[in-house]
Image (cartoon, grey):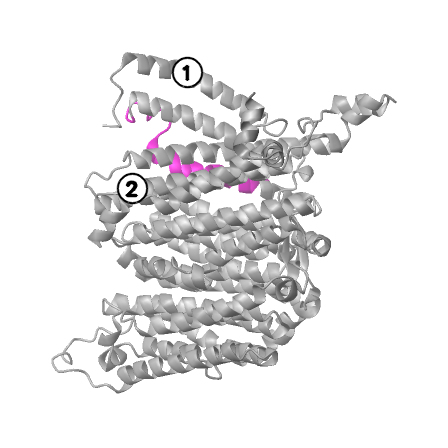
Amino acid sequence: MIRSASASLIVRVTARTVAPLIQVFALYVLFHGHYSPGGGFQGGVMIAASVILMRLSHGTRATQRLLPTSAATRLAALGALMFLLVGALAFRYGGEYLDYGRIPLADSEPMRRSYGILLVELGVALACITALVSIYDDLVGARGHGDGRDV
Amino acid sequence: MTISWARAVTGTDAMFEFFRLHFAHVCIVVLIAIGFFGMVAKRNFVKKLIGMSILQSAIILFWLVSAVKRGATIPIMTEEDLNAAAGSVDSALAASVDPANYMNPLPHTLMLTAIVVAVVTSGVAIALLVRIYRKFGTLEEDSILEQL
Amino acid sequence: MRPDLVEHSPVLIPLLFLGGAMIVILLSMLRPRLSHPIAMGVSGLATILAAFGLERVVSGGTIHYHLGGWTPPIGIELVLDPLSALLVLMMCGVGFLVLMHARRSLPSELPGREPPFYALSLLLLAGLCGIVLTGDLFNLYVFIEIVSLSSYALLGVGSKRAPLSAFRYLVMGTTAGSLYLLGLALVYMQTGTLNMVDLGEILPSVITTAPVGVGLTFMLTGLALKSAIFPLHGWLPDAYTDAISTATALIAPIATKAALYAIIRILFFVVPPNYTTELTPIADLMCVSAGCAIVYGSVMAMGQKELKRMLAYSSVAQVGYIAMGIGLASPLGYLGAVLHILNHACMKGCLFCVSGNLRYTIGHSYLPKIDASVRRRMPWSMAAFSIAAVSMIGLPPTAGFFSKWYLAKGALEQGRWILLSTLLLSTLMNAVYFVRMFEQIYLRPTPEGESGRAATGEAPRSMLVPTLVFAALLLILGLANAVIVAKVLEPMLGGLS
């Protein structure tokens, strides 16, 4: 019941209008994380909120194209792996782990650290989005096995 | 008129001063008490979970309150500020890049992590509650203890 | 080993586990069969790296690893000194052996859900290694919560009661974590630093102020609940008993020990030396709680008929021994506590593996029914059980004797007669109980009508090898005890009271 689309036209149209606005603002928050309040977790949570809004108003099945349920947990692992690998890149260039200053991304050290943190924040955002949507999907039973066995 | 009423309610001037100066801390203590009460006294597991969540939020707020300084500005300093202040003798500009005039950003950063921990804890707790509901059919502590 | 790899080992060990967990999740759809080899491979590599790290630290000195290139106290550092190197090796080793044991025992208890289980186990091990390696108090909180969250999830599956006990554990554990965070806020507000070494230098001047006093108390109380020290142990028996035996085998030997390590680190190496003895009654309180824990745990364990429940209560008693070492607040107490952490890990690892073997072959671990027929059928498992029992009683040359010896010497030196007598009393109670078990296993004849049961033999090799390795480790640790104390533990005593 909670997985089906909402019967009200107002809810569906409003959600369709508001979700892209949420996502644009979330991208703004995400890309300003290393420079002003914001960052991967905050932006990721907002994008996840927009996806869950669409799931709630249009039903889980119709929004599978937005974020497939089966891929959610695996994408979360991918996001975390991105974080780990960017940190490990620092090994290659002779520094300690997470020492973004050594990775040759820009000319000055603060800018290198800035871009390094940006890459890391992208991984964190991916992990947050997919983890939160995956929690929602499990709670409404969208990942059911069809035979009544609980996950 | 409100102040004299408040003075009458709280009893003394000193106590009212205490509440006025430490208003945030008093609110946080009240929140912690509400959270503990929910966890201990309520019989429904979801209400216990809500109490726990209130407790965690109160402690996060406590860290944030510790970051505030009187008259300080937000902890962001751009290169233009630095360059402008470097070449001038204006005392106001020099004060604008003095680290002591900025809020402490460290508690905010640490609390980002703590908020993530709180969110994930709630997620795991709700997952466990879903399993408990599927196995016992209820989320009231008394009914579950009867079934055991 | 290439020198740079060992130098980076403080960060590589948790990283290996984290990366392994992510890869297990990524591959769980395509190749679920690979999850166990990946888990074993990762923990094996981490154990080897930890062994090299211990060898490097003992010969070369402490390694301070500055994450991100930022020097402390601005940055977070990971510290590999003899104590943390020893405990990291213990965590990785126990994890490796239990994951090996899980190859057969897990599919029989939790069919079809192995990849998530292995991913959670790797996350648990990553958090445990992080707790032991970190040199920053907030980083400690983060890793403690990682360990706790993984344990809530691992302990919450299997039987009907498991999610209930896990939920109780969750509420109590999260309250404890929040209490730790609150205390840390107070300490940070007064001192301005979170780095352990830096805090140790600043504390003597502010130790008598109210925020620091209250803050440290909150922090230690939160950690005490996570370690299941006596009055705060209520979550442990139910949570460990109702879970599947593989999960308990992974969590019981090592998870509570990490929180105890945090207490040892704070009380012995961060706060000034006279803090626990003169400034606060912490030492006396710990001794009282240890005595109660030892008596309560031993008595409750003896009354249990089911092996897993008995082991859960005995864990409460063993934590009591370690708390006694902390409460003695002297070099002997420190030695006793750390040695007992090692011994308890091997003892409980062995006993939980035996319990898993029993459940796998004969389907139950109900103690009154374990008689000579079981011993004839599973001679090796029963032999390992006997060695672990001897170590729990505390007879030489097993490891259990030596930790109790140091604890007894420490209690004697301070004239704590009640504590000494509880130690001896519990040893006696354990002796009575286990000799009764030996008589049951080795001497009691099989009752009529059961001798015709077809003996399908011992547990499979992948379950038997970890059991025997744990039992062998108990003997090796006992015999090599002097080497461990001299090379690894004594050098840390330089900065102690």
- In the rendered image, the quadrant that contains the C terminus of chain C is bottom right
**Above or below — where is C149 with respect to C95?**
above
Chain letter of disc 2 in the image: B
| Three-letter amino acid code of the residue under disc 1 | Val
Q: What whole-number distance in Å separates the C-alpha atoms at marks 1 and 2?
A: 30 Å
Work out whether residue A24 or residue C496 is closer to the camera in this orientation and state it.
C496
Q: Secondary structure at mark 1?
A: helix
Is residue A61 found inside the magenta-colored segment of the image? yes
How packed mark 2 is, by other alpha carbons closer than 10 Å (few <14, some 14-19, many 20 or more), is: some
Residue drawn where x is 33% and y is 33% of the image? A137
Stretch of the chain drawn in magenta: A60-86
How packed mark 1 is, by other alpha carbons closer than 10 Å (few <14, some 14-19, many 20 or more), is: few
Q: Return the residue at label 1.
A: A18
- In the rendered image, the quadrant that contains the N terminus of chain C is bottom right
| Three-letter amino acid code of the residue under disc 2 | Val
Q: Is residue C403 visible?
A: yes
Residue drawn where x is 27% and y is 66% of the image? C359
x and y percent of residue C437 in the render? 31, 80
Residue drawn where x is 42% and y is 60% of the image? C233
Q: Which mark is residue B130?
A: 2
Chain letter of disc 1 in the image: A
